[in-house]
């Protein structure tokens, strides 16, 4: 295996709070080991177009507390083609990049797995997604910040819900995973949580609302955006039809969940896996996700990492039922 001299780092897919902390860790660790670092702007699309810049200590100063990603992010249809990936590889060679650290989620690592198989370039990935839907790490970069953003928003929504005796249907992100909805629903004291991993039973929801204390001045239902019954608007329609006396309102939290200053947990997680990614490349690792499992650095092949969580802890669902009375 050729000696690594220049590591390219990029962010791809949806942005997540803590990505900048991860970039900072990769750059400074590479410099610590006397390696060059190249920042690749706009993910795989920028890789194809040759949007690459040398990075040093100063280029990552004062970014650990910033949300988003200084390297920008984009989706790339061209990278899905063999011709596009060949162009990307040629651009990396042209810029002297001989190893890669990709920060992103499922789509990022799907592309990295194929790229790493087609070309002889070591690639490792860092789990950067608010959905927490990757295998090989207990938590993903951005998840902790996102759920705290939701909690802050729902707490404020409850204030107005109590003031007006309202029922709020709150929709949170989670196209393929209900983990944001599940944890925030427990933490916010929601009456019910609807997630894509469990089949929605509207009658069970109605029963939950009816069995709840009649003297409760507010009710909160958390819905994941891709929930099979149709999301917050469809659930609200059914509730209004069943209970026309309820003052039912809808709140779609949307992309507010992606932004903001990363939490302490996300900054530390990003820093740990960022350092570990460079050391993993130097130790010969490739085509692996670098995560943290049981508080220890873990290495998971991309093939296994990109499989979504399929099972939700039933104890968490039971907690919701018990505590919503």
Image: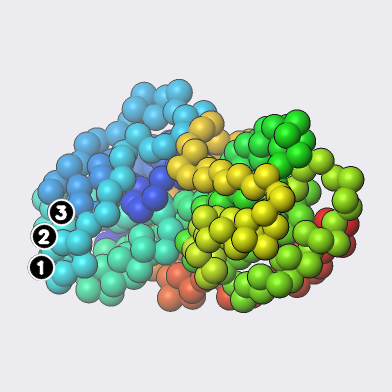
Q: Are marks 3 and 2 in contact (CB under 8 Å)?
A: yes
Residue 44 image-quadrant placement: bottom left
Does residue 176 appear in the picture of this structure? yes
Quadrant for the N terminus, please. Answer: bottom left
Q: Are marks 1 and 3 in contact (CB under 8 Å)?
A: no
What residue is rendered at 22% in x and 36% in y? 53
Residue located beneath label 2 in the image:
87
Structural distance between the alpha carbons of marks 3 and 2: 6 Å
Instruction: State the residue in front, 285 or 184.
Output: 184
For mark 3, give the secondary structure.
Answer: helix
User: Which mark is first along the chain, 2 or 3?
Assistant: 3
Residue 107 in the image: above or below residue 167: below
Residue located beneath label 3 in the image:
48
Quadrant for the C terminus, please. Answer: bottom right
Does residue 266 appear in the picture of this structure? no
Side of 189 where 44 appears, left or right: left
Q: Position of residue 279 (x, y in %)?
A: 47, 53
What residue is rendered at 58% in x and 75% in y? 310
Side of 299 where 82 appears, left or right: left
Q: Are marks 2 and 1 in contact (CB under 8 Å)?
A: yes
Residue located beneath label 1 in the image:
83
Structural distance between the alpha carbons of marks 1 and 3: 10 Å
Q: Position of residue 9 (x, y in %)?
A: 33, 47
The number of numbered discs placed on residues in the rendered structure image is 3
User: Around disc 1, counting alpha carbons within 10 Å, would you say few (fewer than 14), some (14 to 19), or many (20 or more)?
Assistant: few
Instruction: State the residue in front, 31 or 108.
Output: 108
What residue is rendered at 30% in x and 66% in y? 111
Q: Position of residue 207 (x, y in %)?
A: 78, 67
User: Which mark is first along the chain, 3 or 1?
Assistant: 3
What residue is rendered at 79% in x and 63% in y? 208
User: Around disc 2, counting alpha carbons within 10 Å, would you say few (fewer than 14), some (14 to 19), or many (20 or more)?
Assistant: some
Structural distance between the alpha carbons of marks 2 and 1: 6 Å
């Amino acid at each position: 295996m050729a000696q690594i001299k220049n590591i390219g780092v990029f962010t791809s897919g949806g942005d997540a709070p803590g990505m900048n902390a991860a970039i900072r860790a990769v750059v400074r660790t590479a410099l610590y080991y006397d390696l060059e670092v190249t920042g690749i702007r706009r993910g795989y699309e920028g890789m194809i177009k040759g949007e690459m810049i040398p990075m040093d200590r100063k280029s990552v100063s004062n970014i650990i507390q910033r949300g988003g990603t200084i390297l920008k992010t984009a989706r790339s249809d061209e990278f899905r083609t063999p011709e596009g990936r060949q162009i990307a590889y040629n651009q990396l060679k042209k810029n002297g990049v001989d190893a890669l650290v990709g920060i992103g989620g499922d789509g990022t690592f799907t592309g990295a797995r194929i790229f790493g198989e087609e070309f002889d370039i070591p690639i490792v990935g860092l789990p950067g997604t608010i959905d927490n839907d990757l295998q090989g790490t207990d938590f993903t970069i951005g998840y902790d910040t996102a759920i705290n953003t939701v909690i802050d928003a729902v707490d404020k929504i409850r204030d107005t819900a109590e003031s007006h005796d309202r029922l709020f249907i709150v929709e949170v992100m989670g196209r393929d995973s209900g983990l944001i909805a599940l944890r925030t629903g427990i933490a916010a004291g929601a009456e019910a949580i609807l997630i894509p991993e469990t089949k929605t039973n509207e009658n069970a929801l109605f029963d939950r609302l009816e069995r709840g204390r009649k003297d409760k001045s507010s009710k909160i239902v958390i819905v994941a955006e891709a929930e099979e019954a149709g999301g917050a608007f469809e659930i609200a329609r059914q509730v209004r039809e069943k209970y026309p006396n309820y003052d039912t309102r809808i709140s779609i939290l949307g992309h507010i969940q992606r932004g903001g200053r990363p939490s302490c947990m996300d900054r530390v997680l990003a820093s740990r896996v960022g350092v570990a990614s460079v050391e993993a490349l130097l130790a010969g690792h490739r085509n692996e996700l670098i995560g943290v499992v049981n508080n220890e650095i873990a290495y998971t092949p991309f093939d296994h990492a990109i499989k979504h969580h399929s099972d939700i802890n039933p104890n968490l669902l039971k907690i919701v039922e018990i505590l919503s009375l």
